Image (cartoon, grey):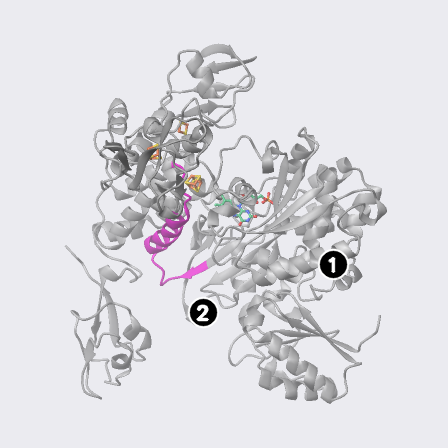
């Protein structure tokens, strides 16, 4: 166990927690977008940044990846944290104006309109779908392709993916609804990459699963 | 060893090779044979001398005569005159500029005179493909000392005393880094040499690998013993074929000589070294991305902590250092940390290799003591600004460095001073800019580079840099708005503080430093729609001054769109509607008859 201070509250927590886990265990709210308990922390959206207070200069750290240690002092709502979070939200709001989660979170922080040009994206590139498909499903059917602002979630080589078992996990974890799954008489279309699937019988277990229509 | 009267040190670095150095070598061999001089004159192909713009370079030892810009056709005459008849050939020597006296000796040339060579100690002196030459120049002696006479703690202590700091960018104290990795629990540890070098225009690491690969290998064996690692990797940028070839040869030879592998020199210490080809992207040079890439994954940074010293390659404690950092190690062990720490400033010890490029007379690679002023580098070594132009600023530290203005030209170069001035040491790029440079355009240029190179993982970097570029573009097009400077500053602060890795954390430097020192230029663009340096195309218009135009038709010939017309010997006419503002006419006019005027758009 280690002793830490979050927002002035002294708490004692297990040493293998992250700041985020420690905070949540103690009912302290920190917003997150790319975090999911079931997955390894990723540290990409930067919404969960908190201030690590120290005598020789405080700094912002992502609470979802930063481990607790004895004596650390954390602020989850300092002016610095709020200012930064607002700017990150303003960026996301311009990138994904259609996303409900972003709109709501931004509103919560008083960000109503972005000063940047609007794009018509929905995906915030949080990587939850890619990581869930890899870490939970084990199918590794989708990946990030390209880099920078050109980065996108796609099946490998942009072709119909043979790895996809059509479990729908990606659509479940996606916070913005960027991946859609429509079911049309046994053949389904994944909107992001228009792949076709149908239900087929598994030779081993005998039950029916979705698989790509070859 | 056979003794020769004369050694011909022929530079075969990348630049000289692309300037025909290998054919010159062939010619030299033929001519020397022709005059029966094979037993007196030895040709030694060496790594880069740093003065690439004067290549191909040949240095004649022992007298130190410096021949430059050689052509194959010069060789028969040169061999006959100098090596047969003993009459050095003046016309192939260096003159600082037209009309001045030639300077025959290398060490009398300003470019070389002010340099202190530690990391580049063997450049231009030995054949990098021959391990014996490295050994003959005291090579692998420090390794012997470290393996047989020193404990790991003693090695680390020596490096700490030296004050050596990482040369790859962040400047973390090397001894301390080794100590942390040594202290990490675990039987298996790794060390890495970062030779990704993605900074455009920087090539110090390439040059070290090409000129003296064994210095890096020796440094790594010493580090491995200090840290307790038995396996190492050299991660080399894929676009560096010659460096890859030379380090590969060096590793093989070192293995043959028992200087790498199991039970090195019978010391009982094992160390194996593997070469890995880089993944290609700029961000792959970032240490966590680099380790992902070695593991075969896409090179994308991961959050720290855990730091590489705790959990690095395949989850094992890992120590990563830059090429130049490693190359300094053998000298520190040989001459002692105290000796090393006497060079430099209070906080930055030793030397740093810079690549001096841009609007400066002598461009090239220079190794100088820390604490040297920018003025000394630019004016003494670099020979000042060409064409009588005025110095405006120098950009240090690569694409995410900052621009330092003329009023700070006497700044002593060290990590802290550069940071205080809003720039960084980075990997050691120095881009000199003259009065014809628009600082808003410069900021836009670097930010566009970083926009393309952002890995895209975290929001502030991916999206924030992109938005900065959009605003900068708008400003250079005369569409800047009141409040844009403040918005840039606000964005910059978030990107710096909230980004995941060093790319994002340093990306705002070019913007912030140009706003800090050249705010008036931003304001001129935004408020007056004027580009004071006449660079931003949308803000200038070209016209002909009829009183000055002689009608020589030179501009007519260069204009790509046929916008300039007019009969010979009469003032020409420039059709602004056809002009694409390439500036070719302006450049070519000998009578100053073309004006690039700032236009006011409103
Ligand atoms: C975007 C980015 C690119 C980098 N590229 C390089 C590089 O090409 N070579 C290098 O040695 N270090 C590079 N670094 C720094 C490394 O992350 C790391 O700090 C360095 O290799 C450590 O070695 P040192 O302590 O000897 O400097 C880069 C950092 C960032 C953020
Ligand atoms: S599709 Fe959804 S889950 Fe996947 S990266 Fe985009 S926003 Fe995240
Ligand atoms: S700062 Fe930029 S390069 Fe680094 S992880 Fe974030 S997006 Fe990738
Ligand atoms: S939740 Fe921590 S960075 Fe996204």
Identified at 28% across, 47% down, the residue is: B470
User: Can residue B424 be seen by looking at this rendering?
Assistant: no
Question: Which of the pair B486/B58 is nearer the observer?
Answer: B58
Q: Is residue B494 above or below residue B197?
A: above
Separation of residues labelled 2 and 1 (CA atoms)? 45 Å
In terms of image quadrants, where is residue A152?
top left
Horizontal side, residue B60 vs residue B239: left or right: right
Looking at the rendering, the stretch of residues picked out in magenta corresponds to B432-458
> Does the magenta portion include B93?
no
Question: Which of the pair B189/A62 is nearer the observer?
Answer: B189
Label 2 crowd (10 A; few <14 / some 14-19 / many >=20): some
Q: Quadrant of the N terminus of chain A?
A: top right
Q: Choose mark 2 or mark 1, whichever is in front.
A: 1
On the image, the x and y values in percent for residue B571 come to 19, 83
On the image, the x and y values in percent for residue B134 come to 75, 60
Given the image, what chain letter belongs to the residue carrying mark 2? B
Label 1 crowd (10 A; few <14 / some 14-19 / many >=20): some
Given the image, what chain letter belongs to the residue carrying mark 1? B
Per the image, the residue denoted by label 2 is B386
Per the image, the residue denoted by label 1 is B253
Find numbered disc 2 in the image and state the secondary structure of the residue it sits on.
helix
On the image, the x and y values in percent for residue A127 come to 39, 34
Q: Quadrant of ligand 2?
A: top left
On the image, the x and y values in percent for residue B222 come to 74, 45
Of labels 2 and 1, earlier in sequence is 1
Q: Quadrant of the C terminus of chain A?
A: top left
> Does the magenta portion include B447?
yes
User: Can residue B515 be seen by looking at this rendering?
Assistant: yes
């Amino acid at each position: 166990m280690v002793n830490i201070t979050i927002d002035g509250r002294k708490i004692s927590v297990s040493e293998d927690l992250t700041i985020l886990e420690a905070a949540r265990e103690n009912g302290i709210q920190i917003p997150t977008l790319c975090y999911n308990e079931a997955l390894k922390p990723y540290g990409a959206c930067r919404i969960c940044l908190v201030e690590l207070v120290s005598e020789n200069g405080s700094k912002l750290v992502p609470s979802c990846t930063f481990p607790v240690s004895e004596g650390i002092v954390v602020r989850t709502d300092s002016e610095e944290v709020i200012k930064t979070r607002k700017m990150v939200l303003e960026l996301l709001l311009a990138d994904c104006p259609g996303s409900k989660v972003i709109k709501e979170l931004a509103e919560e922080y008083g960000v109503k309109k972005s000063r940047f040009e609007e794009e018509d994206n929905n995906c915030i590139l949080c990587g939850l779908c890619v990581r869930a498909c890899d870490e939970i499903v084990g199918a590794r059917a989708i990946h990030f392709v390209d880099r920078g602002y050109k980065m996108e979630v796609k099946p490998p080589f942009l072709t119909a993916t043979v790895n996809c078992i059509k479990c729908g996990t990606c659509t479940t974890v996606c916070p913005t609804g960027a991946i859609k799954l429509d079911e049309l008489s046994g053949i389904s279309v994944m909107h992001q990459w228009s792949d076709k699937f149908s239900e087929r019988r598994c030779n081993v277990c005998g039950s029916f699963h979705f698989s790509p229509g070859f | 060893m056979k003794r020769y009267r004369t050694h011909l040190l022929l530079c075969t670095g990348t630049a000289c090779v692309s300037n025909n150095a290998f054919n010159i070598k062939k010619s030299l061999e033929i001519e020397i044979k022709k005059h029966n001089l094979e037993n007196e004159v030895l040709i030694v192909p060496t790594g880069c001398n740093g003065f690439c713009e004067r290549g191909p370079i040949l240095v004649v030892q022992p007298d130190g005569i410096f021949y430059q810009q050689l052509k194959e056709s010069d060789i028969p005459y040169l061999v006959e005159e100098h090596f047969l008849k003993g009459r050095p050939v003046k016309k192939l020597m260096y003159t600082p500029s037209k009309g001045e006296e030639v300077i025959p000796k290398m060490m009398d040339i300003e470019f070389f005179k002010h340099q202190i060579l530690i990391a580049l100690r063997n450049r231009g002196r030995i054949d990098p493909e021959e391990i014996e030459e490295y050994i003959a120049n005291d090579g692998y002696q420090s390794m012997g000392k470290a393996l047989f006479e020193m404990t790991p703690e003693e090695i680390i202590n020596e490096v700490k005393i030296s004050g050596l700091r990482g040369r790859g960018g962040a400047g973390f104290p090397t001894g301390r880094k080794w100590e942390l990795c040594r202290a990490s629990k675990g039987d298996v540890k790794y060390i890495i040499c970062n030779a990704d070098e993605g900074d455009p225009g920087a090539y110090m690491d390439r040059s070290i690998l090409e000129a003296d690969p064994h210095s890096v290998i020796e440094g790594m064996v010493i580090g491995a013993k200090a840290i307790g690692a038995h396996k190492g990797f050299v991660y080399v940028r894929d676009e560096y074929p010659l460096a890859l070839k030379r380090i590969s040869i060096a590793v093989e030879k070192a293995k043959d000589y028992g200087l790498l592998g199991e039970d090195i020199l019978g010391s009982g210490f094992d160390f194996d070294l593997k070469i890995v080809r880089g993944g290609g992207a700029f961000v792959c040079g970032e240490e966590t991305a680099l380790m992902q890439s070695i593991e075969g994954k896409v090179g994308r940074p991961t959050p720290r902590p855990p730091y590489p010293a705790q959990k690095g390659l395949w989850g094992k404690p890992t120590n990563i250092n830059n090429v130049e950092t490693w190359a300094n190690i053998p000298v520190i062990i040989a001459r002692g940390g105290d000796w090393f720490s006497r060079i430099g400033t209070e906080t930055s010890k030793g030397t740093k290799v810079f690549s001096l490029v841009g609007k400066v007379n002598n461009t090239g690679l220079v190794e100088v003591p820390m604490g040297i002023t920018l003025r000394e580098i630019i004016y003494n070594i670099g020979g000042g600004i060409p064409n009588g132009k005025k110095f405006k600023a120098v950009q240090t530290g690569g694409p995410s460095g900052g621009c330092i203005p003329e009023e700070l030209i006497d700044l002593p170069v060290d990590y802290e001073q550069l940071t205080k001035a809003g720039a960084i040491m980075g990997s050691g790029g120095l881009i000199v800019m003259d009065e014809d440079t628009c600082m808003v355009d410069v900021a836009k240029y670097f930010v566009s580079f970083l926009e393309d190179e952002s890995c895209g993982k975290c929001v502030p970097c991916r999206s924030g840099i992109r938005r900065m570029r959009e605003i900068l573009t708008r400003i250079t097009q005369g569409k800047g708005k009141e409040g844009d400077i403040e918005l840039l500053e606000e964005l910059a602060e978030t990107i710096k503080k909230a980004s995941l890795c060093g790319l994002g954390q340093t990306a705002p430097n070019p913007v912030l430093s140009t706003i800090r020192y050249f705010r008036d230029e931003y304001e001129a663009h935004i408020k007056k729609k004027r580009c004071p340096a006449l660079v931003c195309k949308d803000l200038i218009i070209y016209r002909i001054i009829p009183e000055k135009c002689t009608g020589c038709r030179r501009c007519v010939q260069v204009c790509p769109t046929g916008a300039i017309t007019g009969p010979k010997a009469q003032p020409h006419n420039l059709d602004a509607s056809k002009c694409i503002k390439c500036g070719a006419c302006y450049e070519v006019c000998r009578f100053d008859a073309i004006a690039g005027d700032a236009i006011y758009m409103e």
